[in-house]
């Protein structure tokens, strides 16, 4: 996948949405494997500045709860919850890689780590919105949508 700015990624994702809404994925060691159908292709790519996301640094895309199927290694998935204990964060107990989480902001969706998707890299995204999860909307009374905290930008060394 070529490096694209956020607005071009959205345009490209819409063109390829039907072809590329379905992905295979796995953790680093391959013990956990899954297939996923994304709700809006790669157009939902985002990061978050909450304490958990800030430390793990992953870019996540969205899938409905019934859109993610663990195809191997479910027994290797470990779950972590913190604070309100609403969000469910899953990672491989063998290699430690975060694969997905059930969102606090929308409990009907999973956030899926793009680095776990076959043929997708976090470095394919030139720009990624960062949501303000540190000031979660359920804690601040802003409704169900987190505000945008900022944008992370990736520039390849050869493009400088």
Image (tube, helix red, strand yellow):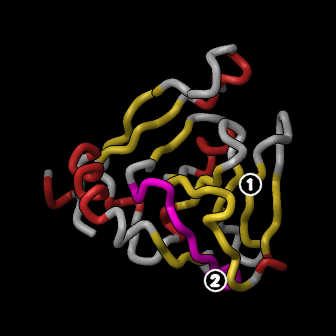
Q: Describe residue 125's horizontal placement relative to residue 45 as left or right.
A: left
| Nearer the observer, 101 or 13 | 13
Asked if labels 2 and 1 touch by Cβ distance under 8 angstroms, the answer is no
Location of residue 6 in the rendering, given as x and y in whole percent from the top left corner: 28, 45
* Residue 104 occupies quadrant: top right
Q: Secondary structure at mark 1?
A: strand
Residue lying at 63% horizontally and 77% vertically, measured from the top left: 34
Give the farthest residue toward the left.
159
| Nearer the observer, 97 or 74 | 74
* Residue matched to label 1: 89
* Residue matched to label 2: 29
Q: Secondary structure at mark 2?
A: loop
Disc 1: CA contacts within 10 A as few (<14), some (14-19) or many (>=20): many
- 64 above or below 91? above
Query: Magenta region: which residues?
Result: 29-42
Q: Nearer the viewer, mark 1 or mark 2?
A: 1
Location of residue 36 in the rendering, given as x and y in whole percent from the top left corner: 56, 70
* Residue 26 occupies quadrant: bottom right
Q: Nearer the N terminus, badge 1 or badge 2? A: 2
Location of residue 35 in the rendering, given as x and y in whole percent from the top left corner: 58, 76
Say whether residue 31 is magenta.
yes
- Give the spatial CA distance, label 1 vs label 2: 18 Å
């Amino acid at each position: 996948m070529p490096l694209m700015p956020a607005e071009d990624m959205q345009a490209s994702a819409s063109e390829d949405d039907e072809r590329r809404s379905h992905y295979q994925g796995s953790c680093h060691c391959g013990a956990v494997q899954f297939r996923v159908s994304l709700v809006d292709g790669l157009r939902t790519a985002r990061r978050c500045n909450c304490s958990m996301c800030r430390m793990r640094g992953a870019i996540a895309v969205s899938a409905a709860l019934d859109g993610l199927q663990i195809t191997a290694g479910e027994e290797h998935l470990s779950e972590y919850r913190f604070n309100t204990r609403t969000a469910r964060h899953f990672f491989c107990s063998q290699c430690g890689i975060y694969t997905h989480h059930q969102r606090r902001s929308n409990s009907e969706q999973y956030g899926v780590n793009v680095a776990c998707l076959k043929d997708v890299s976090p470095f394919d995204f030139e720009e990624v919105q960062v949501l303000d999860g540190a000031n979660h909307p359920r804690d601040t009374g802003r409704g169900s949508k987190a505000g945008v905290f900022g944008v992370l930008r990736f520039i390849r060394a050869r493009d400088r």
